[in-house]
Amino acid sequence: MSILAPPQSQTIAPGQALDWERIADDLDQQGWALLPGLIAQLDCDATAALYDREEGFRSRVIMARHGFGRGEYRYFAYPLPPLIQHLRSSLYPHLAPIANHWYERMGIATCFPDTHEAFLGRCHAAGQQCPTPLLLRYGPQDYNCLHQDLYGEHVFPLQVAALLSAPGRDFSGGEFVLTEQRPRMQTRAAVVPLGKGDAVLFAVNQRPMRGTRGDYRVALRHGVSAIREGRRHTLGIIFHDAA
């Protein structure tokens, strides 16, 4: 299947096959949640194969040149491939209520609209008009330093990373890592178990946590540990656009 065609029927239609009550609870408890089998196996292969094409991307980043780690990634251009557009627009309506609840708990006045189209309109009006979904490729000894994907004033607080390669077959190492920094406490780390086609939904930069005196904010960063062997491809779905 070409990724330029509509998404396959095997691809989960977010909201129908995902347990959003469990997902919201996991996000509140740990700042991340698994989306198992989000992308069909053939769609994983077709998406990863896009990396070597010249068309369809707006930029390419070599991580070592910027101190980001080792490996590289490419940002998609508009119009996005149908599968990626489908995931972005279909997941967002389920995430917006979670994001609004988080912001209310953190005392942030921003309210996110019901549709992704409306939110992108807000980004584009502020000059954030560059698409942010990206395709990452890692080889032996490549890694991604801990970071946050912030691209401008308007930030949607949740994002998705989907693994397009099979651990133990296509690559070894390369674990997805999240860290959480609570005020006046040591950093807590989590290694997220992902199989091919699975995705992790996680906080972009901060989330609320309930304490004895009410809610407070904790900061999160994410990255990828070093690849030992093989090649690893990942699809990143970020919901805000970049300036």
Image (cartoon, grey):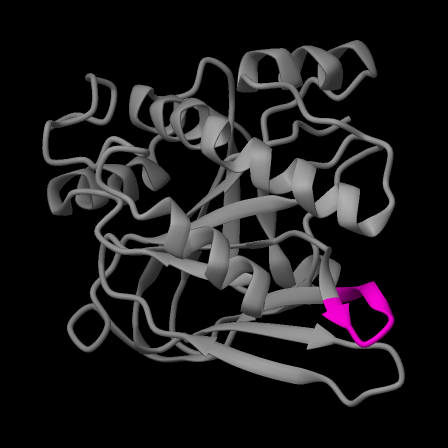
Query: Residue 140's x, y, as percent?
Result: 39, 76
The residue at the point 69 percent across, 17 percent down is 129
Q: Is residue 3 left or right of residue 81?
A: left
Quadrant hosting residue 30: bottom right
> What are the residue bounds of the magenta stretch?
210-219
Give the total of numbered labels: 0
Q: Is residue 215 left or right of residue 48?
A: right
The residue at the point 64 percent across, 17 percent down is 120
Q: Is residue 79 visible?
A: yes
Residue 118 vertical position relative to residue 35 in the rendered view, above or below:
above
Query: Residue 187's x, y, as percent?
Result: 73, 84
Question: Magenta region, mostly helix, strand or loop?
Answer: strand
Q: Is residue 202 left or right of residue 84?
A: right
Q: Is residue 59 visible?
A: no
Q: Does the magenta segment cover residue 217?
A: yes
Q: Nearer the viewer, residue 82 or 144?
A: 82
Q: Does the magenta segment cover residue 214?
A: yes
Query: Residue 132's x, y, as percent?
Result: 59, 33
Residue 56 vertical position relative to residue 158 in the rendered view, above or below:
above
The residue at the point 56 percent across, 12 percent down is 117
Q: Quadrant of the N terminus?
A: top left
Q: Nearer the viewer, residue 4 or 229?
A: 4
The residue at the point 31 percent across, 19 percent down is 82
